[in-house]
Image: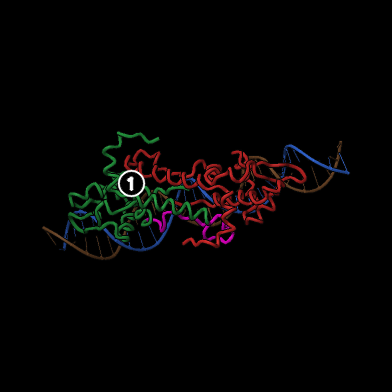
Chain colours: A green, B red, C blue, D brown
Amino acid sequence: MKLSVKSDYAARAVLGLARHYPSGATVRVEDLATEQSVPRNYLVQILIELKAQGLARSVRGKEGGYLLARPPGEITLGQVLRAVHGTVFDTPALEDAGCPPELRLAWRELQKALDAAADGITFQRLLEESGEKDKMYYI
Amino acid sequence: MKLSVKSDYAARAVLGLARHYPSGATVRVEDLATEQSVPRNYLVQILIELKAQGLARSVRGKEGGYLLARPPGEITLGQVLRAVHGTVFDTPALEDAGCPPELRLAWRELQKALDAAADGITFQRLLEESGEKDKMYYI
DNA sequence: TCGCTTTTCACCGAGAGTTTCACGCCCGCA
DNA sequence: TGCGGGCGTGAAACTCTCGGTGAAAAGCGA
């Protein structure tokens, strides 16, 4: 069960845009790329997918760039993951006829757990928690 | 977030062994492979890893084969997943210095959710639920 | 029209994941 | 002590997706 780098990059991008959201200004791809240390040309592809899913908007021409289509509080990690891949949890097992039905139940259960967790995380919350992250220790 | 075929195969193998556990008889690799429709030689590698983690035992010679090291009630899906890969939830993001700390919290959260879900599923339960699976409808 | 940006397309290179093959080894039994 | 049936192991081949590049097209503002 591996998280693709693409997913990580997408989340970074949204997080970066979320930081600039209050100002209302656009963010250039160039800046976002260096700021979040994501390969520039790769980031472009990801942003296009995010835009296609209605998570981001773009403005062309001078003073152009990207910005979030909705406030960070209304964007969840699940939405971002689904934007870049089709689904949060992908497995060939559910399509494979050789997979015993008992196992499918198990995979579905994992799928559900993951979906719930991902949809419970909004970028608003991530920004807020970053401020108080030194208070608590995660393992 | 993709589940590898290997994970699926490993789970199938354990499930197959769990079915034969009550009888106490060994299961030949050959039979297990065809029964669960898993490539024979690939299954061998997986079984070796399961054995190394103390989930399965093997018997050599005539009448040889594999069997579960513990009752199905004491084997969770999480253990199986960790046996074949190092961890249930793997991500380069947690190692990458470029990943913002806020996101790490998010990934960890997903990781936790997945771990909890996987460890809550025992193969005993899967076998039991298979009998009554027609009672309920999953989406 | 010029310069700035996004947008799109085509492709590739590497690497992981998957699968197969061939042979060695170990056990139980006669 | 030899034989056979199974496991054990390593490496080779194959597939495929991911990660990344580059250049050209297209829109917008001045």
Image coords of residue A32 (percent x, y): 27, 48
Which residue is nearer to you in this view: A82 or B125? B125
Q: Is residue B94 above or below residue C13?
A: above
Image check: B36 left or right of A75?
right
Name the residue carrying label 1. Answer: A38
Asked whether A5 falls inside the magenta stretch, the response is: no
Residue range (magenta): A84-104
On the image, the x and y values in percent for residue A139 come to: 40, 35
Q: Main secondary structure of the magenta part?
A: loop
In the image, taking residue A120 as reference, residue B89 lies left or right, namely right
Q: What residue type is labelled 1?
A: Val
**Rendered location of residue A75, percent (x, y):** 30, 53
Chain designation of label 1: A
Asked which quadrant contains residue A88, the reply is bottom left
At label 1, counting other C-alpha atoms closer than 10 Å, the crowd grade (few under 14, some 14-19, many 20 or more) is many
In the image, taking residue A47 as reference, residue B41 lies left or right, namely right
